[in-house]
Image: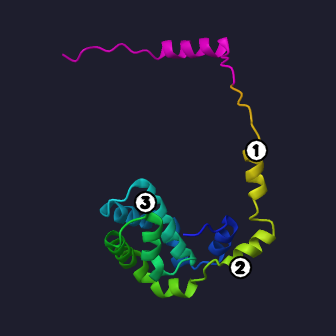
């Protein structure tokens, strides 16, 4: 799972066929993925990563046949766990659109990273280092409440008090 720049993801979404875009946004598909993750006892953190990897397949950044390898690598799980996980995902989500997934496959390469970086869209190294070098004081806001608001709230609460009578 490589970090694909958001701009590239949005560009890919713009040209993605409807059959591949729907699984990324319709709740029924995320429910299927969540059920698969639960059946295989993935933690919430691993489930999030699993869903990102599956999204990379639908977006065409990852080939469907590489799913198991990516899950094993990124979730740090044994192949005995990731193999059935990938197989079930393939059967339930990828099988109906497998040919379209393969046709849409265009990985984001190292050359793409260099070109993107040269354009200035990906170069954040200076920003990160400058943030690490500066000490920024934290200022806390003082708790000031307007007395007018406090009395209005109290009056509203007094008006809403209801006497409870026993049912017996």
Look at mark 3 in the image and give the residue it sits on: 47
Magenta span contains residue 150 = yes
Q: Residue at x 50, y 69 (%)?
A: 53
Q: CA distance from mark 2 to mark 3?
A: 30 Å
Q: CA distance from mark 1 to mark 3?
A: 35 Å
Which structural element holds mark 3?
helix
Look at mark 2 in the image and give the residue it sits on: 111
Contact flag, marks 2 and 3 (Cβ < 8 Å): no
Q: Residue at x 28, y 14 (%)?
A: 165
Look at mark 1 in the image and give the residue it sits on: 133
Contact flag, marks 1 and 3 (Cβ < 8 Å): no
Q: Residue at x 74, y 65 (%)?
A: 122
Q: Position of residue 32 (x, y in %)?
A: 38, 66
Which structural element holds mark 2?
helix
Decide if residue 121 is in sight here.
yes
Q: How many marks?
A: 3
Name the residue nearer the viewer: 146 or 68: 68
Residues rendered magenta in the picture: 141-168
Q: Is residue 155 above or below residue 64?
A: above
Q: CA distance from mark 2 to mark 1?
A: 31 Å
Name the residue nearer the viewer: 100 or 4: 4
In which quarter of the view is residue 164 placed?
top left
In which quarter of the view is residue 117 placed?
bottom right
Is tag 1's residue or tag 3's residue first in the polypeptide sequence? 3
Left or right of 144 on screen, residue 61: left
Image quadrant where one finds the N terminus: bottom right
Q: Is residue 108 above or below residue 26?
A: below
Q: Residue at x 42, y 82 (%)?
A: 96
């Amino acid at each position: 799972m490589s970090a694909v720049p958001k701009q590239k993801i949005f560009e890919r979404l713009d040209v993605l066929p409807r059959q591949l875009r729907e699984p990324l946004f319709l709740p029924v598909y995320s429910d299927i993925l969540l059920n698969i993750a639960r059946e295989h006892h993935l933690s919430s953190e691993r489930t999030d990563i699993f869903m990102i990897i599956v999204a990379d397949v639908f977006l065409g950044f990852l080939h469907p046949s590489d799913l198991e390898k990516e899950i094993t690598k990124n979730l740090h799980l044994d192949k005995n766990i990731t193999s059935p996980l990938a197989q079930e995902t393939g059967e339930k989500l990828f099988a109906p659109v497998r040919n379209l997934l393969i046709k849409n496959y265009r990985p984001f390469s190292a050359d793409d990273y260099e070109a993107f970086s040269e354009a200035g869209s990906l170069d954040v190294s200076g920003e990160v280092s400058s943030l690490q070098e500066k000490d920024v004081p934290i200022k806390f806001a003082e708790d000031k409440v307007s007395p007018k608001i406090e009395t209005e709230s109290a009056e509203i609460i007094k008006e809403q008090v209801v006497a409870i009578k026993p049912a017996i």
